[in-house]
Image (cartoon, grey):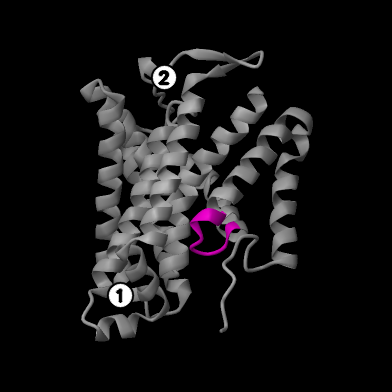
């Protein structure tokens, strides 16, 4: 039971991180290598603000808001001039952002590790089917489900989601209708970065906060995007849980094969279904 809970919590945490990349990559076509650096920045901001305010919640909310605002600024000042250029310009820019954000973090917090304690309300354990389960992992699962449902409703069922999909598929037509494509794109990038910062702040009580966070997670994020299908929120949820389960059960039964199994899953998907396991079926009628 404990392994199942760990797998679900890993999956939900990975979804929180990968959901923003799914939006940015799927809706804007931007390959954002700096997504992991934003995740790291969110963790450090949550740590600093939480320590100063004495409130874990204030730290989480502040980190999410600051990283979302940072994403809006990054999109407006750096990415917007590159949309009509080849993708390698975006790759170079976002790789450069990793270096910039990492050096900013190093300047303010140094190269060492930081640790965040779970809030008192979520710091205990409960007994479930003979297993001792940390309450915080149950919180991560529930919180991830709430965020996934909210994001699905935002993208698939709201007017904003309709505008985002229209701006992604035919931006010139959206401009012709007098709608602000630039603002819509900036909003998507800000939401994606905010989700990454949120994931960092939620992950802070589970993992040490350190500079390697900027690069250690980005590979798993892109695996989720590929498995789930571009811009597919439901696919990102399913792919995140699948990878979480593979890692959780793999570490218990086949620890030395975990990375191999993860990459085998990726390679098998690329060979058999390159559009993603959960990609939308296009209607031709």
For the question of whether residue 43 can be seen, the reply is: yes
Of the two numbered discs 1 and 2 in the rendering, the one whose residue sits closer to the viewer:
2
The residue drawn where x is 36% and y is 19% is 119
Q: Point out the stretch of residues depicted in magenta.
A: 228-235
Which quadrant does the N terminus fall into?
top right
Magenta-span inclusion, residue 233 = yes
Relative to 112, does residue 197 appear above or below in the rendering?
Answer: below
Q: Earlier in the sequence, mark 1 or mark 2?
A: 1
Disc 1 designates what residue?
Answer: 81
- Name which residue lies at 42% across and 67% down: 27
Give the x, y percent position of residue 239.
60, 50
Q: Residues within 10 Å of mark 1 (few under 14, many from 20)?
A: few
Residue 186 at x, y = what percent? 28, 64
Residue situated in front as seen by the camera: 190 or 277: 277
Dot 2 falls on a residue whose secondary structure is helix
In the rendered view, tell whether residue 120 sits above or below residue 232.
above
> Tag 1, which secondary structure?
helix
Residue 229 drawn above or below residue 202: below
């Amino acid at each position: 039971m404990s392994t199942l809970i760990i797998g679900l919590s890993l999956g939900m945490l990975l979804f929180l991180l990968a959901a923003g990349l799914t939006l940015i990559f799927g809706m804007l076509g931007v390959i954002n290598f700096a997504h992991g650096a934003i995740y790291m920045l969110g963790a450090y901001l949550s740590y600093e603000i939480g320590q100063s305010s004495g409130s874990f919640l204030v730290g989480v909310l502040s980190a999410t808001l600051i990283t979302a605002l940072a994403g809006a600024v990054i999109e407006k000042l750096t990415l917007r001039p590159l949309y009509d250029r080849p993708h390698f310009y975006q790759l170079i820019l976002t790789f450069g952002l990793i270096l910039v954000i990492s050096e900013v973090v190093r300047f303010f917090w140094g190269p060492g590790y930081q640790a965040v304690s779970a809030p008192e309300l979520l710091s205990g354990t409960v007994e479930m089917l003979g297993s001792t389960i940390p309450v915080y992992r149950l919180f991560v699962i529930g919180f991830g489900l709430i965020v996934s449902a909210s994001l699905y409703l935002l993208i698939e069922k709201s007017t904003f989601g309709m505008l985002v999909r229209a701006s992604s598929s035919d931006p010139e037509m959206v401009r012709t209708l007098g709608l602000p494509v630039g603002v819509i794109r900036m909003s998507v990038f800000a939401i994606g970065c905010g989700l990454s910062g949120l994931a960092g702040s939620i992950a802070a009580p589970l993992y040490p906060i350190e500079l390697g966070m900027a690069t250690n997670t980005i590979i798993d994020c892109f695996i989720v995007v590929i498995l789930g299908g571009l811009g597919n929120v439901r696919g990102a949820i399913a792919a995140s849980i699948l990878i979480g389960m593979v890692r959780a059960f793999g570490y218990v039964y086949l620890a030395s094969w975990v990375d191999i199994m993860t990459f085998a899953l990726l390679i098998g998907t690329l060979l058999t279904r390159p559009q993603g396991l959960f990609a939308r079926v296009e209607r031709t009628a």
